[in-house]
């Protein structure tokens, strides 16, 4: 039973380019969360999605960042016009339900902006 | 503002010692608290989940307790092994939300030397 799958594991972009990070939740999980871990900082919540719906995006930067979880396929975190401050590890987590269920995290996608 | 403080920030112990990691949080209206371990360059592995109605959870050599009234949780590791070396993170549901919007501490870096 595969865990949460994230790709790419490492991504290098130049300033101004776009970054797309993908996340496939665990089998049977329909709730997806994105977190960001900046260098020397703790993990911060970004967004919570269910299939085709954004439930809570209170942690998303107001500009350049967007997330989706389509009916078919993985969840996508998209960062437009990346800047050096976007360099971080982006983690996806999934849960079976949206209640007090346990979160399972992927290995993360490490974005480096040159 | 929800905050999580983990003490100590780093801990180095010889193999075989029993140890306690501490976590304190500011919001008593939590739904659950979760302990994770993170290995360098890796994702998070869930260790224990304590529901707000529970006082403790045990898994193998690990025992986690929760005291909502004092805003504290402890992770007890018995008979530590070098393989336990990792960063240990505690996190809880933020702002009374019932889904996986977690607030994380900065972590305790544990080193167990042979």
Image: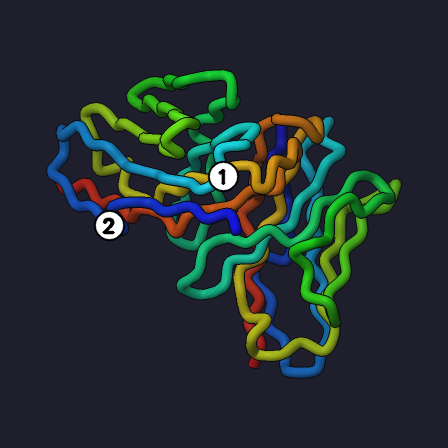
From the viewer's perspective, is residue A14 above or below residue A49? below
Callout 1 crowding tier (Cα within 10 Å): few <14, some 14–19, many ≥20: some
Q: Identify the residue at image location x=72%, y=63%.
A: A20
Q: Identify the residue at image location x=55%, y=54%.
A: A44
Quadrant for the C terminus of chain B, please. top left
Question: What kind of element bears circle 1?
Answer: loop
Figure quadrant of residue A96: top right
From the viewer's perspective, is residue B76 above or below residue B41? above
Closer to viewer: mark 1 or mark 2: 1
Q: Identify the residue at image location x=14%, y=28%.
A: B16
Residue B14 image offset from top left, x and y in percent: 11, 38
Task: Please say if the residues under marks 1 and 2 sit with CB atoms less than 8 Å apart.
Answer: no
Position of B10 compared to B91: left or right?
A: left
Callout 2 crowding tier (Cα within 10 Å): few <14, some 14–19, many ≥20: some
Residue B5 image offset from top left, x and y in percent: 36, 47
Residue on which the image places disc 1:
B27
Residue on which the image places disc 2:
B10
Position of A45 compared to B85: left or right?
A: right
Q: Earlier in the sequence, mark 1 or mark 2?
A: 2
């Amino acid at each position: 039973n595969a865990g949460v799958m994230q790709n790419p594991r490492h991504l290098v972009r130049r300033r101004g380019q776009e970054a797309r990070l993908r996340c496939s939740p665990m089998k049977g999980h329909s709730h997806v969360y994105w977190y960001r871990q900046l260098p020397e900082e703790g993990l911060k919540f970004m967004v919570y999605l269910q299939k085709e719906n954004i439930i809570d995006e209170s942690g998303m930067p107001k500009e350049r960042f967007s997330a989706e979880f389509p009916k078919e396929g993985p969840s996508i975190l998209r960062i437009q016009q990346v800047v050096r401050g976007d360099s971080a590890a982006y983690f996806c987590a999934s849960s079976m339900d949206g209640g007090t269920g346990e979160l399972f995290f992927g290995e993360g996608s490490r974005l480096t902006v040159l | 503002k929800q905050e999580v403080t983990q003490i100590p920030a780093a801990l180095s112990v010889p193999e075989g010692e029993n140890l306690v990691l501490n976590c304190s949080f500011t919001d008593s209206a939590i739904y659950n608290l979760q302990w994770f371990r993170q290995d360098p360059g890796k994702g998070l592995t869930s260790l224990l989940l304590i529901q707000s109605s529970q006082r403790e959870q045990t898994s193998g050599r690990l025992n986690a307790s929760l005291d909502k009234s004092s805003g504290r949780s402890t992770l007890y590791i018995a008979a530590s092994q070098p393989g336990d070396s990792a960063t240990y993170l505690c996190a809880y549901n933020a702002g009374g939300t019932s889904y996986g919007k977690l607030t994380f501490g900065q972590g305790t870096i544990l080193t167990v030397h042979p």
